[in-house]
Image (cartoon, grey):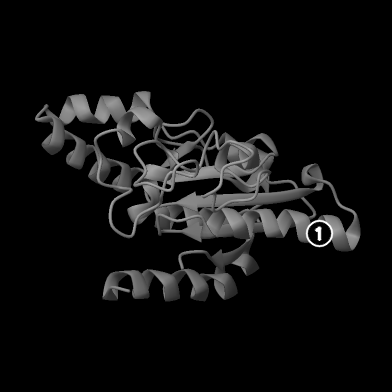
Amino acid sequence: MTQRREFLKHASLLAVGTMSAGRLEAQELPQVQGSYDMSWTAKVTGKYRMAFDAPALNGTSLHQVRSFLAGYGTVYGLTDAELSAVLIVRHANVPMVLGDALWADAPWGEKEGPKDPATGEDAKRNPFINVPADAEHATTWPDGTLDKLMARGVIVLACDLALGNAAGGIARRRKIPMQDAQQLVTEHLIPGVYRMPSGIFATCHAQGVGCGMMYAGD
């Protein structure tokens, strides 16, 4: 783990003890000044609320979100609608929220990266969505893929800074202007994902609206 990731990990954990005490009610939220869509905050209404800080490109965070939902269903009989889970996708993990077209020529599935759930080969499509039910190499539960979790009401926030870094890589690989690469990222962002200025902002604000925090990077 790099020094920067270690710092961010501990910063997010430390924030659990500070931000949760200062929960913001909906009527207290300030007026949004920029173009970011903050309507997701109105969806954080569950009796139990948890945010998952997910900087690593693997299925760990998806497993943890599913376990949160499943655990409260098993112990208390709560439905997904009675719980609030916020998945914060940042740092190296932003390819998780990008469509197949941007995976086709990207190195994200190479070496130690995620594998295609059907073939086990280096992923050249997003391996966290549209996973066949009988996929031999799947690393997620059938009801715990990114698209299935979103359909179950999980809120997904993506770091805009990291999306910009991904766009930079696309621009270099495809030899296109950065502006065009940024447009591709916008066009192929999975529908329903909310862009936030940064992962740090997203983690802090999720706690501010009542979520606990779990580091889901390893």
Looking at the image, residue 65 sits to the left or right of residue 115; the answer is right
At label 1, which amino acid type do we have? Tyr
Q: Residue 208: in sight, yes or no?
A: no
Residue at 11% over, 38% down: 172
In this rendering, is residue 182 above or below 113?
above
Looking at the image, residue 125 sits to the left or right of residue 70; the answer is left
In this rendering, is residue 7 above or below 193?
below
Secondary structure beneath dot 1 equals helix
Which percent across, then down, holds residue 101?
Answer: 34, 27
Which percent across, then down, holds residue 188?
Answer: 38, 27
Residue named by callout 1: 72
Q: Quadrant of the N terminus?
A: bottom left
Quadrant in the picture for residue 106: top left
Residue at 28% over, 51% down: 110
Looking at the image, residue 102 sits to the left or right of residue 69; the answer is left
In this rendering, is residue 34 above or below 63?
above
Q: Report the front residue among 70 and 48.
A: 70
Which percent across, then down, holds residue 36?
Answer: 43, 35
Q: Report the front residue among 58 and 134.
A: 134
